[in-house]
């Protein structure tokens, strides 16, 4: 069984994740996560902090990720109903660490978000993914989306999956 | 502008309505800046945000750039962030520790106490030039209540302590969560804009009428996680009893029996079994220190407090300090922090922060829907406020005695104070 992954395979995996999120195929996206996965968005003024002692924008464990997805699929999730359209561009993919079990991967993102008659909102930053190979397939154990903006400011919300 | 009524209050009818122009008209915002923001005590920050001599945070308060800092004697100070020479902002960083504040333009420098210290080529100035005349300017008044620091641009304002009136009781309830009576702002700032008038966030911050419809997905999340909710009693909309109360000077509160869990100190399944002993320990400490009745008051009720005009303490799923300033009639900047007891254990701190994020903030499971509501109000009224001028706010007006959290007494209290101040000529300067 496959024990590691090439950068090409990792890039394909990240592009696949981005495509699922842009298409709001959220259940399939959940299928990419490990059963102990975390999803984090640090506060803009503390991009390298620990959510146990720092207020984040989002710090979900797998239970809250599932709750978040349940919510986003509900038409009463008003902030995302009708849903935003997003388009993610991911680049500069680097494997920054690996051991027998896990890969640490960083990449840059630009996410354009459109909603109703609003002009573009551009979320720029980088991802820190912790990937595991489970049953020969890449899975996400932790994904952290770190925004470059000094404050959320005119970006407003992070109501979609960043 | 004063020839048109902006707030209609008729206790006899009874009816209460707010003119939607108050959310739209740039002239009203201009007047608000003078008669509300430059006349009231306005929150600057919490003393825990700056701890040692020279610690500073820069932020914008009432449209002014300020340096919120500790001086050489470790007293909390607020300086206007503008060089006395030509006006450059002397401090351009968001936070840090400064030995001196140096203006990079011509090199004037100020010490931690705001005194002008260095002037390159000082001998070229006339003999009448004295450095002691050119320290960093300060707002006319800066006072604090139990760690919360406010400024006032009206030199003749009543003392902060008098101004806060009945709001103090509710600030004290937050403070009582700490065994030593000291709270701290936890690092990590949520700073974001809402495309809506700032007063819509005032209303929303303690409007429990919207909870069931705006936040149904959050309530579902809690229910799915095993949180028990009662069917509302007769005449109630919400799963637990709660009241709305005016506290004087426009401050007001909703004060609810808790069903949503509290890090201090009411466990709910969302926190996980592992957190249960810690929450019980916190509860036991509260009872030992405050007695059963006061402990229950602190732990078993949750409260959303509005300190007029723009400070909100949401003592709910966690404690949020939230303040906001208008950028335009249809736009505001929000700053929000989590507040916790200084001596909290790392485990309890983690629960507090996690509980915060279930509801609050731009990535929470509830706040985004509030923001959507506010932006949809703004979009709805901006172009129609001449055809549809009035928003009604009369819930509970025919009741005598206690008003529910889903009534609107507390919203009316805010608007009556707002209207009173907007009709008040500012004191003559000097």
Image: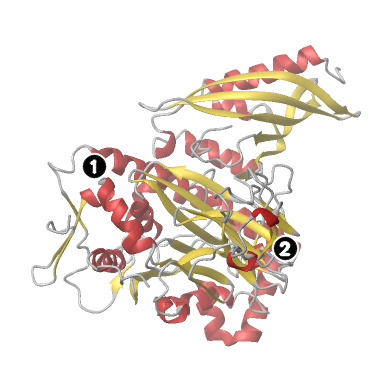
Residue at the far bottom: name it: B291
| Chain of the residue under the numbered disc 2 shown in the image | B
Q: Is residue A134 left or right of residue B367?
A: right
The residue lying at 66 percent from left, 34 percent from top is: A145
The picture places residue B156, in percent across and down from the top left corner, at 39, 76
The picture places residue A91, in percent across and down from the top left corner, at 69, 18
B107 vs B179: above or below: above
Quadrant where the N terminus of chain A is found in the figure: top right
B169 vs B237: above or below: below
As helix, strand or loop, the secondary structure at mark 1 comes to helix
Q: Earlier in the sequence, mark 2 or mark 1?
A: 2
The 10 Å Cα crowd at callout 2, few under 14, some 14 to 19, many 20 or more, is many
The residue lying at 44 percent from left, 34 percent from top is: A80
In-front residue for pair B223/B358 = B358
Q: Is residue B250 left or right of residue A20?
A: left
The picture places residue B189, in percent across and down from the top left corner, at 60, 51
In-front residue for pair A79/B337 = B337
* Label drawn at residue B143: none
Residue at the far right: name it: A100
As helix, strand or loop, the secondary structure at mark 2 comes to loop
| Chain of the residue under the numbered disc 1 shown in the image | B
Does the rendering let one see residue B114? no
Numbered disc in front, either 2 or 1: 2
Question: Which residue is under mark 2?
Answer: B54
Does the rendering let one see residue B187? yes
In-front residue for pair A152/B99 = B99
The 10 Å Cα crowd at callout 1, few under 14, some 14 to 19, many 20 or more, is some
Question: Which residue is under mark 1?
Answer: B381
């Amino acid at each position: 069984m496959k024990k590691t992954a090439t950068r090409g395979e990792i890039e394909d995996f990240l592009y696949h994740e981005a495509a699922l999120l842009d298409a709001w195929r959220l259940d399939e996206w959940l299928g990419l996560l490990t059963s102990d996965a975390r999803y984090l968005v640090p506060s803009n003024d503390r991009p390298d902090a620990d959510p146990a002692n720092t207020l984040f924008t989002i710090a979900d464990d797998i239970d809250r990720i599932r709750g978040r997805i349940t919510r986003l699929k509900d038409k009463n999730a008003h902030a995302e109903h009708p849903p935003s359209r997003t388009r993610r561009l991911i680049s500069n993919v680097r494997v920054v660490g690996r051991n027998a079990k896990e890969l640490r991967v960083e990449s840059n993102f630009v996410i354009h978000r459109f909603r109703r008659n609003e002009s573009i909102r551009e979320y720029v930053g980088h991802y820190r993914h912790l990937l595991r190979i489970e049953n020969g397939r890449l899975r996400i154990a932790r994904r952290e989306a770190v925004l470059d903006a000094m404050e959320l400011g005119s970006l407003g919300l992070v109501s979609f999956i960043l | 502008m004063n020839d048109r009524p902006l707030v209609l209050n008729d206790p006899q009818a009874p009816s209460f309505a707010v003119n939607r122009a108050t959310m739209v008209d740039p002239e009203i915002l201009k007047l608000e800046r003078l008669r509300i923001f430059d006349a009231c005590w306005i929150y600057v920050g919490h003393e825990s945000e700056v701890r040692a001599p020279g610690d500073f945070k820069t932020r914008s308060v009432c449209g002014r750039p300020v340096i919120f800092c500790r001086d050489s004697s470790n007293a909390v100070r607020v300086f206007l962030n503008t060089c006395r020479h030509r006006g450059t902002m002397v401090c351009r960083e968001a936070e840090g520790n400064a030995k001196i504040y140096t203006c990079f333009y011509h090199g004037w420098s100020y010490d931690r106490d705001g005194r002008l210290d260095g002037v390159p080529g000082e001998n070229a100035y006339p003999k009448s030039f004295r450095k002691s005349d050119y320290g960093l300017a300060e707002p006319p008044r800066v006072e604090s209540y139990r760690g919360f620091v406010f400024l006032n641009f009206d030199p003749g304002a009543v003392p902060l302590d008098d101004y806060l009136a009945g709001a103090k009781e509710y600030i004290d309830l937050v403070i009582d969560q700490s065994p030593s009576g000291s709270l701290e702002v936890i690092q990590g700032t949520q700073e974001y804009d809402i495309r809506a008038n700032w007063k819509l966030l005032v209303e929303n911050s303690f409007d429990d009428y919207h909870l069931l419809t705006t936040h149904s997905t959050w309530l579902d999340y809690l229910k799915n996680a095993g949180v028990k909710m009662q069917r509302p009693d007769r005449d109630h909309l919400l799963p637990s009893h709660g009241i709305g109360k005016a506290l004087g000077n426009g401050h007001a509160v909703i004060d609810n029996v808790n069903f949503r869990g509290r890090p201090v100190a009411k466990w709910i399944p969302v926190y996980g079994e592992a957190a249960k002993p810690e929450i019980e320990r916190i509860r036991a400490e509260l009872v030992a220190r405050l007695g059963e009745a006061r402990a229950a008051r602190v732990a078993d009720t949750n409260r959303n407090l509005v300190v007029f005009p723009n400070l909100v303490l949401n003592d709910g799923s966690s404690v949020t300090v939230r303040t906001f300033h208008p950028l335009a009639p249809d736009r505001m900047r929000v700053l929000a922090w989590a507040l916790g007891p200084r001596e909290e254990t790392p485990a309890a701190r983690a629960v507090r922060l996690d509980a915060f994020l279930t509801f609050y903030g731009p990535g929470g499971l509830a706040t985004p829907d509030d923001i959507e509501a506010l932006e949809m109000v703004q979009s709805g009224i901006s172009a129609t406020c001449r055809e549809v001028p009035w928003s009604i706010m009369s819930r509970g007006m025919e009741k005598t005695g206690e008003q529910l959290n889903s009534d609107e007494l507390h919203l009316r209290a805010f608007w009556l104070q707002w209207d009173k101040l907007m009709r008040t000529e500012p004191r003559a300067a000097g």
